[in-house]
Amino acid sequence: MDQVLLARSLFGTTMAFHIIFATIGVGLPLMILIVEVLYQLTGDGDYALMAKRWTRGFAVLLGVAIPSGTIAGVQLSLLWPEFMKVVGKVIALPFQIEIFAFLLEALFMSIYVYAADRLSRGMRILSVVLVAFGAVMSAILITNVHAFEGTPTGFKIVNGELVDIHPWEAFFNPSFAVSATHVTVSAYMTGAFVVASMAAYKMLRRGLPQKEYVFHRKALLCGLIVGGIFSALTGLNGHASAQHLYREQPEKLAAAEGLFETTTYAPLTIGGFTDKKTHEVKYGIEIPWALSFLADNRFDTEVKGLNEWPEEDWPPLFIHTLFNAMVGVGMLLLLMSIVGFAWHRLLKRQTFPRWMIWSFFVSGPLSMLGIEFGWIFSCTGRQPWILYRVMRTSEAATHTGNLGTLFLLFTGVYLMLAVVVVVVLRAYFKRHPLGDDLLTEEDGMHV
Amino acid sequence: MSDELIAVSLLWLFVFIYAMAASIDFGAGFWALMYLYRKENNMTTIANRYLSPSWEVTNVFIVLVVVGMVSFFPGATGTLGTVLLLPFSIGLLLLTVRSAFLVFSHAAEKRYARTLSVISGATGIFLPMLLILVLPITYGDVIGVSGGTEHLLWGALLSSPSTYAYLAFAGLSTLFLSSLLLADYSHVSEDWRAYKVYRKDAIWMAPFAFLAAISVLVTMRGDAPWMYENLSAHKGWILGSGVLYLLGYLALFAPKKAGMPANGRPRLAVVATIFQYLLAATGYGMAHLPYIVYPTVTIESGFTDESTFHALFASYLVGFAILTPGFWLFWRMFMRDKKYLRQK
Ligand code: HDD
Ligand code: HEM
Ligand code: HEM
């Protein structure tokens, strides 16, 4: 493999790994906060117990989120030195401010975990609020850099020199708001479905004591309701993101939809595979006029096709599939949470049929897949640019050798950590079963 | 002061803070491992009580150093990123394994907890040695250029006496600083048995760490004469550092205060030692200027854009002002609260 491809694979693998733990790191604190508040409102000890158990799991996950993020941060400078020169001069602010978000989260996470028993109720809630705030700010600020890569602003290049630099203009680049919102709501959605998924997994066990079933059903409903709300928001905002692509990165939208010829009344193609030779999407379902409407709310909108650009500037065409998969996940999960909620609240059923619980169980992994698809779509769809129409990825990559070995080493460590973290979490919750915790709770030994 | 000088001083301060915090952090992991198999002791518990809440905060500082480097001196990232790719990648892998296993060992079952903490303690001790390689690398002699790109000359690096002086300095300082801090920590916790052990460790490590520091100076003379000359012009800092070393060392032998069951004034020793390293780092840093990487990258040639620097500087002021209460609460909860420190 050539140098650039290796660098891309190494960085992409790091990000694909980090994002799993990072997304839970953003989503789970919100869920913990919600149950902490529910506990204050209802006085129901189950909610306090949920907060306690989720926090234990969260503390373990942070043990992977933080080092993998450190890798991402350092690798960025090691693998893309030319790109980081621009970053350092123009878009250093979000990286810098992000440090404060990390510090905020790290300080209050330790306080919340290791000093919980010495904090007043108010301070405890405040600590969770600050942890959740720090986490979401980390995500928003790093997304700021990602948004800048797609819509670089706030500087000029004259004779290869960066001039006329306005760091705040670069910070508030055109796609910042819409991207940051999409990342935030999709992370909240994923955190909620991960919770729902774990609850569903427990509810699949036969012969579960009534008290435990009720406990898990409460957690499941929390997950479904919050997840449902945020998947609706993700879809709405995703639509805005697509309209942004139409204006800011038209070749990405064209590749996402497999559109080759510039057309008005453009059709939306769902599914299928883009064929580079015949310039069509094979086996897809076409909805006439829909793409034009999605792009700019009018059927006669002209949507640019890939043929407008030289082929070497095309993004890879498989992003059509990634885009469809992401949208599909969003729609499916929205539907699922509506069904689950209606079943319990409108039809007033106390138990769920097994097939329904199974589908709740897959909601967490599905949502995480949505995150992965979305990011790979977004990063790969920007190719061949690392900075859209300013710098090519190949110009930015390091020239140092040994990348192949490093790729294998890092991938090996990620695989090992993924296995160990699952083993540790399973063993931990096996040794601290819910049944025991429920008993201590009855004895009045509140958290 | 020029903007470049302010920036490099801030960056050097971050490096210093990280070096101190990380030495203590990595060393504490090592001591936790050392005393893991000794029966009836509290040494490992003390080390872990310090480590558990603080490693995350320490870790942020390494990110701060990298981000500070890139944002203040983007002109240096080309050279540094290229040359450091391999050593830092290995460092990252070790750091990852260490942090993850450290966290896992608190959650895992007893029999796995040991294996996990052995691995995290052992990987931790290599990290300072790997990270300190940046310093001899910036001497410049071990960077080669071929086909227009720079690369690290491993052979030259591994055959340079400076390299080994720095390795010894990093390893021994780590053990010295962490045993000293843990001595103070167990003193505050009134765990006298642990205090005596850690005090003894500190007393043992201090002269070796000091000798290693001298060997860094001696080897510098041959490997980086430009820097040695500069350093002679800033002798005062180094001499001051030596004086504080003696002061700190003697504080460990101070006669016990009334009511205390053991000798020594560890808090005084910690403060003196931190200032000892601070003075030495200041002299060292001044002697390194104006070069970031000798002789190609200077603080002027690598500097960021003016307006970016001003925005960054403002964000530092606001950021640290907002975070100060957080640090204060953290300190109170984990370094001073008797209820936390003296739990069994
Ligand atoms: C559970 C996750 C999830 C779900 C259900 C969706 N998205 Fe998404 N999407 C993401 C998770 C995500 C993401 C991982 O968070 C991305 C990657 C980059 C970004 O800004 O957000 C993303 C990017 C992204 C982009 C690219 C932005 C860019 O490259 O600048 C578009 C156009 C959409 N999304 C559109 C949608 C639409 C129309 C959805 C309809 C339901 C949708 N997304 C659901
Ligand atoms: C907001 C945070 C992110 C930033 C700033 C970012 C930035 C980058 C940069 C600089 C590159 C290398 C240059 C390039 O190939 O264009 C890259 C590539 C890549 N990133 Fe991202 N990324 C982010 C998030 C993610 C996430 C969460 C994923 C998860 C899957 C991801 C997946 C990838 C992949 C697969 C590549 C290689 C793309 C290719 O070359 O085809 N990125 N990203
Ligand atoms: C959208 C994608 C991303 C999200 C949602 C995200 C979120 C997070 C979260 C929640 C943490 C844990 C924070 C803490 O507890 O301190 C974290 C850690 C970290 N992330 Fe990411 N991250 C993303 C992408 C990236 C990228 C692209 C980089 C690198 C350039 C990065 C660098 C880091 C670093 C350096 C840390 C460790 C901070 C520490 O030492 O505490 N992240 N990230």
Image (cartoon, coloured by chain):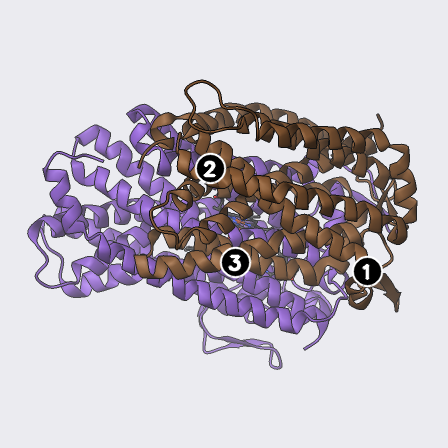
Chain colours: A purple, B brown
Please identify the residue farthest to the bottom as the structure is shown: A277
> Can you identify the residue that label 3 sits on?
B122
Real-space CA distance between mark 1 and mark 3, rounded to the nearest whole angstrom: 26 Å
> Can you identify the residue that label 2 sits on?
B196
Q: Position of residue B179 (x, y in %)?
A: 54, 41
Left or right: where B173 falls relative to B333: right
Q: Residue A382: which disc?
A: none
> Can you identify the residue that label 1 sits on?
B160
Instruction: Look at the picture and state if A246 lies above or below A136.
Output: below
Q: Could you classify mark 3 by the number of other residues whose Cα lies within 10 Å: few (under 14), some (14-19), or many (20 or more)?
A: some
Q: Could you classify mark 2 by the number of other residues whose Cα lies within 10 Å: few (under 14), some (14-19), or many (20 or more)?
A: some
Q: Residue at x 41, y 28 (%)?
A: B333
- Of residues B235 and A163, which is closer to you in this image? B235
**Mark toward the start of the polypeptide (2 vs 3):** 3
Please identify the residue farthest to the top as the structure is shown: B258
- Of badges 2 and 3, nearer the viewer stands 2
Please identify the residue farthest to the front as the structure is shown: B255
Check if mark 2's residue and mark 1's residue have beta carbons within 8 Å: no
* Quarter where residue A30 is shown: top left
- Of residues A72 and B22, which is closer to you in this image? B22
The answer to whether marks 1 and 3 sit on the same chain is: yes
Q: The residue marked by circle 3 belongs to what chain?
A: B
Q: What is the secondary structure assignment of the residue under circle 1?
A: loop
Real-space CA distance between mark 2 and mark 3, rounded to the nearest whole angstrom: 24 Å
